[in-house]
Image (cartoon, rainbow, N blue to C red):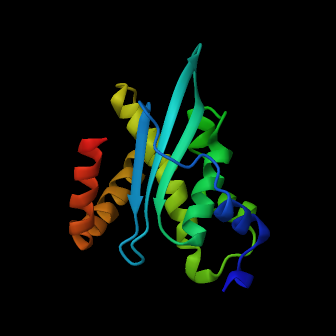
Amino acid sequence: MLEFYSKEIMKHFKKPKNMGRMKNPSAIGKVGNPVCGDVMWLYIKVREEGDKRIISDVKFECFGCVVAIAVTSMITTMAKGKTLEEAVKITKDDILKRAGKIPPLKVHCSVLAADALHEAIYDYYTRNGLPVPEYLKKEHERIKKTLKRVEEMFKKYVDLQKETMKKA
């Protein structure tokens, strides 16, 4: 199966960048896929420089396949150092272009990675009382519905994760 993956995918899978939970993040994006069960958490730290808000650090946790882990690693490197306005423009197509060869069955992972980043940005705006662009509100509603289905399907795992988070 590994011959179906590009060198870029394998590089990020074998040595993921920015993996792990972040202490005191500015915002968190959580997404999931009800079909494959992949779940991603993307944490961002944002620093303000004048009127710009820049992603100064990004970390992630991913429970998923080779591609899910790799593309989440990739999006962290793509978003780090960008303003929120620049980062929210990163799409699944940008990720796919950078990723190279991915089996068609795994393309949805790139959507999840982009969604995780966009959810973190949405979370930052709402936590800080900033106006949320309309397109980001609509995207958030779509993502929220999907995540609810994932949580319903994997309730036992989600309960275990909540207990773990309380202890951390």
Quadrant where the image shows the N terminus: bottom right
Answer whether residue 134 is visible to the viewer in this image. no
Residue located at (24% from left, 59% from top)? 160
Q: Residue furthest front?
A: 167
Q: Position of residue 133 (x, y in %)?
A: 44, 39
Q: Position of residue 99 (x, y in %)?
A: 71, 65
Q: Please give the name of the residue rendered at 21% of the width and 67% of the height, measured from the top-left corner.
A: 155
Farthest-out residue, right: 7
Q: Which corner quadrant of the image does residue 2 belong to?
A: bottom right
Name the spot of residue 29 as percent of width and height, x first: 42, 47
Q: Is residue 51 above or below residue 90?
A: above
Q: Nearer the viewer, residue 164 or 75?
A: 164
Relative height, residue 41 to residue 110 (above, below): above
Apparent side of residue 94 relative to residue 132 in the rendered image (left or right) = right
Q: Quadrant of residue 86?
A: top right
Give above or below for 122 relative to 129. below
* Residue 104 x, y percent position in the rendering: 62, 82
